[in-house]
Image (cartoon, helix red, strand yellow):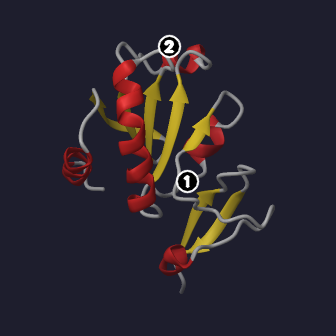
Amino acid sequence: MVQMTHVTCAKCNGKNRIPTDRLDDKPKCGKCKTPVFKGKPIELSSSNVAAVLNHNDVPVLVDCWAPWCGPCKTFAPTFEQAAAELEPKLRLAKLNTEQAQSIAGRWNIRSIPTLILFVGAKEKARLAGAVPLAQLKQWLAQQGV
């Protein structure tokens, strides 16, 4: 029996069932036909956060940031690179805490940048501060990702 993995489309938020052994084959969304993985973080908002967290069988790493934050701006290219290297085994997303203050409040974001790792739509771990890519990968490995 083929094992299936549920993954949210980065463009339309459609829920896709993809054979787990085919995740690296650049699958396309069954709804909008665009690539499910784009090698870039998904922009989270109040309209898509539930779909992204609840409809992904792969872990989701969220970068909570703000446009005025210097360390956030410094960390942004590292997070982009992580998305390019770590998809499809990990889904990366960004939450602008200025635009989504209710979500940031619900998640108790007290400093930025803050990285939150969600597994099965539940928070598994968090890391505060901008870190180099090697340190991010090491932290993810410690979390079992």
Picture quadrant where residue 14 is located: bottom right
Name the residue carrying label 2. 105
Which structural element holds mark 1?
loop
> Residue 18, percent across and down?
61, 72
> Residue 9, percent across and down?
67, 56
> Residue 143, percent across and down?
24, 48
Q: Disc 1 to disc 2, how far (Cα)?
A: 23 Å
Q: Amino acid at mark 2?
A: Gly
Q: Residue at x 65, y 52 (%)?
A: 10
Q: Residue at x 51, y 42 (%)?
A: 93
Which structural element holds mark 2?
helix
Which image quarter holds the N terminus? bottom right
Check residue 94 in the rendering and tell me which mark sits there, or answer none.
Answer: none
Picture quadrant where residue 51 is located: top right
For residue 59, say whether it is visible: no
Of residue 77 and residue 38, the one placed in the foreground of this image is: 77
Above or below 116: residue 72 = above
Q: Residue at x 39, y 61 (%)?
A: 85
Above or below 76: residue 84 = below
For residue 50, say whether it is visible: yes
Give the mark, 1 or 2, whose residue is nearer the N terminus.
1
Of residue 82 and residue 61, the one placed in the foreground of this image is: 82
> Residue 67, percent across and down?
51, 20
Of residue 66 and residue 77, the one placed in the foreground of this image is: 77
Name the residue carrying label 1. 56
